[in-house]
Image (cartoon, rainbow, N blue to C red):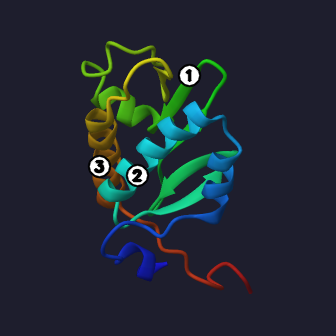
Amino acid sequence: MAADRDRVGPPAPSPEVDRYLEALPPDQREGLGQLRAALRQALPGAREEIRYAMPAFVAEEVLVYYAANRGHLGFYPTASGIARFQAELAAWPCSKGAVRLSWEEPLPLDLLVDIARFRAEESRAKPRRRHRRGADSA
C-alpha cells in the first residue's frame, strides 16, 4: 500500500462509495457528495473504502467515516477527533466518536476538513508495529 500512501492528489474514487451515494435520496446524496469532495481534496494520501457499511477514508488506519442516517449526516472522526475539536463542535450533538449534522443546515465543511487533517497527522505520528513473519513458528 505504499503507492497509495505516497500518492499525490486526491484519492481515486471508490466504486463502492459511488454505489453507496447513488442509493441515497438526492438531498442526502448532495450533502455527502460535498463532504466526500472536500475530504478527497484534504486527504491526498488516503484511500476510500466502505467499512462497517459506511464510506471511510483510510491511510495507515481509518481516519474518518461518514454516513447518511434517517435524521442526520453522521461524521465519525474517532474519539480523538471529537476530543481535539470539542469546543468547535459545541454547536452540534456529539458522542464520544460521532458528530450528528442536520440535513437542514449547511455543512461545516472547513471544520470537518480540519478534523480529518488532524486525524491524518495523528495517524502518521503513531509508531507502527512491524510484524516478523515466522518469528513465532517453529
First reached walking from the N terminus: tag 3 or tag 2: 2
Q: Nearer the viewer, residue 34 or 96?
A: 34
Name the residue: 56% across, 81% down: 132
Name the residue: 48% across, 54% down: 57
Q: Secondary structure at mark 2?
A: helix
- Disc 2 crowd rating (10 Å Cα; few below 14, some 14-19, many 20+) is few
Q: Name the residue that disc number 2 marks.
A: 37
Residue 126 visible in the displayed image: no
- Disc 3 crowd rating (10 Å Cα; few below 14, some 14-19, many 20+) is some
Name the residue: 67% across, 78% down: 136
Q: Give percent across and percent down for residue 101.
A: 46, 22
How far separated are the C-alphas under marks 1 and 2? 19 Å
Q: Nearer the viewer, residue 104 or 125?
A: 104
Note whether 29 is above or below 120 in the view shown.
above
Callout 1, which amino acid?
Answer: His
Q: Quadrant of residue 9?
A: bottom left
How far separated are the C-alphas under marks 3 and 2? 14 Å
Residue 120 visible in the displayed image: yes
How far separated are the C-alphas under marks 3 and 1? 23 Å
First reached walking from the N terminus: tag 1 or tag 2: 2
Number of numbered labels in the structure image:
3
Q: Nearer the viewer, mark 3 or mark 2?
A: 2
Note whether 108 is above or below 23 in the view shown.
above
Toward the right, the furthest residue is: 138
Q: Quadrant of residue 89?
A: top left
Callout 2, which amino acid?
Answer: Ala
Tell me if label 3 and label 1 are in contact, CB under 8 Å: no
Q: Secondary structure at mark 3?
A: helix
Q: Name the residue that disc number 1 marks.
A: 72
Q: Name the residue that disc number 3 marks.
A: 117
Callout 3, which amino acid?
Answer: Arg
